[in-house]
Every structure is written in C-alpha cells, then in structure tokens.
Image (spheres, grey):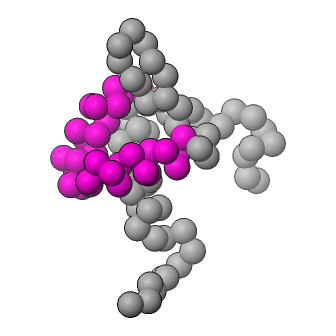
Amino acid sequence: MSKIITSPGNDVGAGKINDILRVMQVHRKLAKKSLYSLVFARTRMAYDDFKDALESAMAAGVLEERTEGNVRLIILEPKTNEKDTFK
C-alpha cells in the first residue's frame, strides 16, 4: 500500500511532534514522565511513538533534555540565535 502525502511536513511523525510541542508551549519545562502522561491523555500516543517524536524534536534543537537530581526534564528551548530564525 502506498503512502499518500497531502502536504509536505504533514505526515504522522510531524503530527506527533506537534502534539508534544503543543503541550510544551504551555508548560515550557516538564518531567519526561509528566510530559508523556499529558500527551497520552490528549492523544493516546504509544510510548514508542512518543520516544521517536521526542528524539526528533531534540535533534532539531527545539527541545532539550536535562537531568536535575533524579528527574529527567524536557525543556522547550526557543531559538534565540538569529541565524537559526527564518525571516
């Protein structure tokens, strides 16, 4: 079965990343477990899909993962470097 693309960047993976970013735009900083709980409650996203989408967002530099004590935090990092901003 072939995959039908309706518009660039509008695939299933991009939608999952957007689901995570919507939550992070509200909270800015969350424990990884809390982030997944909120995303799951909203979308019923499988944990493997969550991990893949989160990893993609971190690789793109949109989110950052830090450890404080024994808690893994996810932090929304707005781009502040002008060369990284589209005009």
Label count reads 0
Of 46 and 9, nearer the camera is 46
Q: At 39% across and 9% down in the image, what residue appears?
A: 69
Name the chief secondary structure element in magenta: helix
Residue 52 in percent (x, y) is at 43, 51
Q: Is residue 16 above or below residue 73?
A: below
Q: Residue furthest right?
A: 83
Residue 51 is a magenta residue: yes
Q: Quarter of the image holding residue 45?
A: bottom left
Q: At 76% across and 53% down in the image, what residue appears?
A: 87
Residue 37 in percent (x, y) is at 23, 39
Q: At 49% across and 22% down in the image, what residue appears?
A: 66
The span shown in magenta is: 29-58
Residue 34 is a magenta residue: yes
Residue 80 in percent (x, y) is at 69, 33
Q: Would you say 72 lies left or right of 45 here?
A: right
Viewer can see residue 22: no
Q: Would you say 50 lies left or right of 45 here?
A: right
